[in-house]
Image: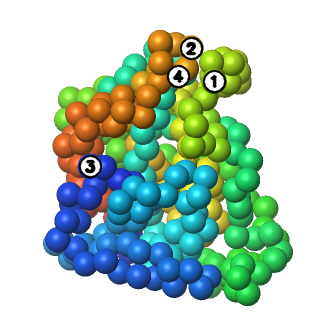
Amino acid sequence: MKIKRAIIGGSGVYEIFEESEPLNVNAFGRKVTLYKLERNGKEVFFLPRHGKDHSVPPHKIDYLGNIYALYSLGVTEIIATNAVGSIIPEVKPGEFVLPDQFIDNTRNRVLTFFSGEKINGWEPKIKLSDGTIREGVVHLDYTEPYCPRLRNLLGEITEKFGEKVHYSGVYVCSEGPRFETPAEVEMYRRFGGTIAGMTTVPEVVLAREANMCYATICLVTNYGAGMQKKVTHEEVIELFNEKTQVVRKIIENAVFSDVESLTCNCRV
């Protein structure tokens, strides 16, 4: 099956699609705006997670609509970007992490397409590779929630640009939009967490339900609360801006790579 890739992210990615026209997709009666770019015969989509003007906070993102919109366009692989805080000393600000596991500490998010109920009057149905339909109530395996093939691809590209990258880690996802307390950071560390953020769940969960490979490259922008004097949004933005160009190069090389073989177990 031919690969069709999409990017979910923000800063560092907009520049790749700056000449692209917006594309509006209907997902469960809700409008999802994304952008399309064609290069060397490859069609790639970009979905700005927080909106083009970064006005949507993590707990208000339409995760269901976003993932279903990409599914409806025939996307088979999603590469995401995240700004995260480190909760262990060994992972330093300015480094990259490719998580292979997550811990869900969200509270009020819709975590599945398949609750047995309609969404705005729509009944979610996902067509699998063999033509069967995934619908109703569904229970899937998440032993490997993040695609190992995409993680390796991102890691190899990141290293080529001379950046420090950790090929594994546990992403602890909280509800947001506030940062964690020192007590929460300590708890996450004791649970085995590596980094903390606000957006990988339910993206990674819904991508698997929609039969898509998913991986995220996380830029560590700060240490968690209690590990440094103070955590500010300005600090996060400042470090992310410093790495904007390398993030863009990593993502651009990944989504337009010539790797076309499906050698993972994410899709059925």
Disc 3 to disc 1, how far (Cα)?
28 Å
Specify whether 100 is left or right of 105.
Answer: left
Considering depth in this image, is 141 or 62 the residue closer to the camera? 62
Q: Are marks 4 and 2 in contact (CB under 8 Å)?
A: yes
SS assignment at label 1: loop
Amino acid type of the residue tagged 4 in the rendering: Gly
SS assignment at label 3: loop
Amino acid type of the residue tagged 1 in the rendering: Thr
The chosen color scheme is rainbow
Name which of mark 1 and mark 2 comes first in the sequence. Answer: 1
Q: Where is the N terminus found, in terms of image quarters? A: bottom left
Q: Say the numbered circle drawn on residue 224.
A: 4
Which residue is the site of mark 3?
A: 12
Name which of mark 4 and mark 1 comes first in the sequence. Answer: 1
* Nearer to us: label 4 or label 1: 1
Q: Are marks 3 and 1 in contact (CB under 8 Å)?
A: no
SS assignment at label 4: loop
Disc 1 to disc 2, how far (Cα)?
8 Å
Q: Residue at x 49, y 46 (%)?
A: 148
Disc 4 to disc 2, how far (Cα)?
6 Å
Which residue is the site of mark 1?
A: 181
Disc 4 to disc 3, how far (Cα)?
23 Å
Specify whether 43 is left or right of 214.
Answer: left
Say few, some or many: other residues with alpha carbon within 10 Å of mark 2 (under 14 / 14 to 19 / 20 or more). some
SS assignment at label 2: loop
Say few, some or many: other residues with alpha carbon within 10 Å of mark 4 (under 14 / 14 to 19 / 20 or more). many
Name which of mark 4 and mark 3 comes first in the sequence. Answer: 3
In the rendered image, residue 131, in percent from the top left (x then y), is placed at 62, 85
Q: Say the numbered circle drawn on residue 226.
A: 2
